[in-house]
Amino acid sequence: MAKKYSSCRYERHDVLRVFNETNQPKTMRKPMKFRISYYIPIFLASTLSTTVQATTWPDDANAILQYRNYYWDENPQDGAGPTREEWVHALLLEMDSGDIHDTFGFELGLGAADALMVGDSADNITNLRAGSSVQDPHGFAEVTRAYLRAQFGDDGHRLRLGAGKKTRHYRLYADNPTRILPAASLGYDLFYEVGDLEIYFSRIERFSRREDGNWGDKLSNFQGQEIDAVHLAGLDYSLPADLRLEAEYLESDDYIRQGLVRLSHQAQLGDDLTLQTRIAHGRQEDAGERFDTQAIPGRYPAASGHNARYNEFGLRLSHHDSYVGVDHTRVWGDNYDRLLFADDHGYWESSGNNFYRFGLEGEAMWKVSAGLGFADLGLPGLRWDGAYAFSDEATGFSDFSRREWRSRLQYRFDGALDGLSLAWLYVNHDTDGEPAAINGKAPTFGPAGLITHEANRLYLTYRYDF
């Protein structure tokens, strides 16, 4: 059976765990390294927090200091996938000036991350960048956000502008925030709101990886050819009868283009019961001379072009802070798995985008999900969310099967421990199948490829609001 994996950068969810180093064998312990660069964000955090408290700011100004401590234990079971055991921590300061004179504002983020321990059996690390070995990763400090913004108009017509580095999130593009420090992009954004309609545009020129701090690298394809920018435009329109229309178009210049149209409806079935219905259609195709037609080892086979589509349907029934849902996604044409540039972590706003993508050509996924809040039982800080997704066919494979179970349990403390939270994420993803000789199109790599992965991820975070 052919099962392989590459850098495995495509998972979507994170975890926390309280981990006692003294209970580990000495061979697993790696000493924390301190470099002067790690102290820069800590020094700036102290300086900025003092400034925020001592200066008169708009009422909506705020500063947040977070300590993050993650322990991840992952393995491929009997299949193919990464083996990870990493215990890392980070300090992150984020400041927002609020709206100065109701018009201008700025946002600033500073972060530093390092390893506490990497297990001897690990062959992959994902929160930091490996150094001379996986067991000797590089810690880093960086500016995670530096963003200027302005707004003009009133509630009837409002224009918002922004420029700089930040973690962006749209329907077709998202900087991945699921590691100890988030990915970010450098670019420009414009939003115009009139009544129930919002129109927006974004241009992204540089990208900062989530596991390696820098101001931002230029975009390129896998052959090293530079991509000028990623352009994105969209609209969000609240229609009569509780309907909502979302549409978005994106193009990574001369490389990949994508489109999405989604219509949703929300119906009140009672005072506390809501039914949401959603249908969507998306497409992804090559967009010019920079598209990689030759094989990309570990990701894509050789291809003269790319043309992938998917349809999606979903239902969700919600009551207070609990819900149940069912989703169905079908892909055709090609695999829905192309990245927007070589360093991109990949994003797909679809129910088929789980811990890994259910996005192979011909793949039809069904997913059942549920979430439960425990406030009515006297535990307002406790919450559980889970999902089970499965598919049994994909073009170019024989004996294909994909299954994924995901469970997330989270508790947010209050009172004297307000700001502290713990979470545990468990994922079991298994993909089976043999590539069949059908036009040579069956890949075993990429965001939707054959991979087996069991993950236990634990987070401990503490947040302090100034």
Image (cartoon, grey):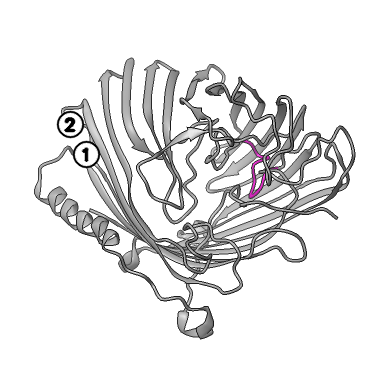
Q: Which residue is labeled 1 in the image? A: 97
Q: Is residue 196 magenta?
A: no
Query: In the rendered picture of this protein, how many numbered marks are placed on residues?
Result: 2
Q: Main secondary structure of the magenta part?
A: loop
Residue 403 versus residue 350 in the image, above or below: below
Query: In the picture, which quadrant includes the N terminus?
Result: bottom right
Is residue 355 covered in magenta?
yes
Q: Position of residue 9 (x, y in %)?
A: 58, 49
Write the start and end of the magenta stretch as one range. Answer: 350-357
Of residues 415 and 403, the one nearer the viewer is: 403
Q: Nearer the viewer, residue 204 or 65?
A: 204
Q: Is residue 24 visible?
A: no
Q: Provide residue 195's location: percent of width, then percent of height.
A: 40, 15
Tell me whether circle 1 and circle 2 mark residues in contact (CB < 8 Å).
yes
Residue in the image at 63% along x and 58% along y: 407
| Residue at the (75%, 38%) spot, across then down | 360
Q: For residue 96, which quarter of the picture? A: top left
Q: In percent of the image, x 57 and y 38: which residue is there?
A: 347
Determine whether, in the image, residue 366 is placed left or right of residue 6: right
